Image: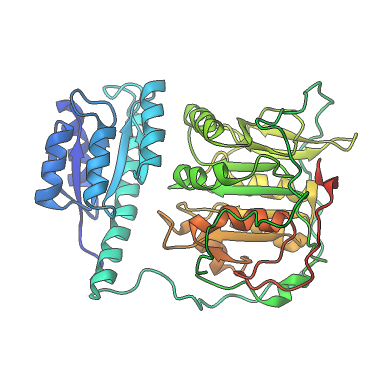
Amino acid sequence: MVDRLVKTLVVDDSTTVRRMVSGWIEEGSGLELVGSASNGADAIHQCRIYDPDVVVLDVEMPGMSGLEALHHIVREDRSRVVIMFSALTREGIGATIEALDSGAADYITKPSSLGGGRAGLQETRRELLEKAVALGGRRQRARELKRGDGVSYRAPSNIPRQRPRPVSPLPTTQGPTAVPASSATPAVAKVPPKPLWVSQTAPVSVRSAPVPVVDTVAPKVRRGVAGASTGVDAVVVGSSTGGPAALTEIIPKLPHDFPVPLLLVQHMPALFAQMLAERLDAKSHLSVKLAEDGEIVRRSVVYIAPGGLHLQVARHTSGEIRCVLVDLPPENSCKPAANLLFRSAVEAWGSRLLGVVLTGMGSDGTAGAESIVRSGGRVIVQDEESSVVWGMPGSIVQAGLHDGIFPLKALAGEVVDRVLHRASARSGQIGEVPRSVSPSVEV
């Protein structure tokens, strides 16, 4: 069966914090507290004894840090879920971002004062219990599937899809307010540019060998939806739980002269988003930055939505497309929300849009993906096996809005192929492939 209690281990050097979090777990539904540890070495030892499904791991501890303990824990069992418990300091956040790259499944931020602020404590409690149950339950199901004594958690490759809904013209909505002209200057490429379309003799795909595809494209009838275009003028991305590690796998593999802008929403607080942008920027050929209100959207730049604000785009009267940051209520409990970015991108680029939905809890991105598909654009998703949580991409698949499901390691190459208008043998696309890419895609 797959409904056993999720075995949980709490690790923190503070006795007060250990007792508090252990109490949350003992009172929570679906969880079982199997132990608590005050340092990294003891955490590794207790993992070997109790085999917890979830480890709630403090980031900053004397002696062996949480990051050092993480490396040992995931090396011994990569299926074990580690949730980092991070203080809202620049050092703690930096270590947490590194932990997410190193195998941690997710993180919880400690309230600024664990001794006060009842609302903050209750929100931390709710988030921790929700993630521990969801991620720990997934680990149990995956282990049972591997042993052959449980029901498969992974959907079969021939998962039924709904037929595309009857297409009607997009409703007239009030898009983001056009922003005034700005003196923003174009971003400078980090590497002297060499046009990506100069030579097609060597494949641009980042893969060294073809990667098996989990699924095929959505029904062929979708190719004709609203006059679907073969070109891509912008890429929009949505991700949540597991997203930082997925983005670290994708963004650094995009070439320095990637000929379109990429805008993304990752669900995380403001300072986390800033640190993620800095980390990706240091690892990537492209310029990666937090989006700023009113700045011109330019090719070869990755724009990340700031935490706590929605990122949208709007076409200025001069024809330039600009970022618009809005302080609207959360959508599907998400702020920023991928849905708002996706819908505004449809208003700006129409059918010449590629949506990418990565690992994450919930269904943010599904309503926005429907707008992309209705306008004639395409949406691809990360597969279940490589996702930490298949909520967001799975919701796209269940709605029949996807144009391909790909393993994480194949997504960067797939995005490049589609932006360059090259046919994808992996996704089963058909049609003539242009011999070159027009440089007119710059916005």
Single out the residue that lies furthest toward the front.
Answer: 201
- Looking at the figure, which quarter contains the N terminus? bottom left
Residue 196 in sight here: yes
Between 257 and 308, the one lying in front of the other is 257
Residue 96 locus on image (x, y percent): 37, 33
Scheme by which the image is coloured: rainbow
For the C terminus, which image quadrant? top right
- Residue name at image x 28 percent, y 52 percent: 78
Place residue 303 in its image quadrant: top right
Question: Is residue 271 shown above or below 24?
Answer: above
Residue 392, visible in the rendered structure: no
Q: Residue at x 22, y 44 (%)?
A: 73
Position of residue 392 measured from the top left corner of the image (x, y, whole percent):
51, 56
Question: Relative to 214, is 141 on the left or the right?
Answer: left
Q: Is residue 225 above or below residue 443?
A: below
Determine the image quadrant of residue 226: bottom right
Q: Position of residue 341 (x, y in %)?
A: 66, 44
Tell me residue 441's x, y (percent).
81, 47
Residue in the image at 32% along x and 28% along y = 118
Front in this rendered view, residue 321 or 97: 97
> From the viewer's perspective, is 387 left or right of 122?
right
Q: Residue furthest left?
A: 49
Q: Nearer the viewer, residue 53 or 335?
A: 53
Question: Which is more toward the observer, 231 or 259?
Answer: 259
The number of numbered discs placed on residues in the rendered structure image is: 0
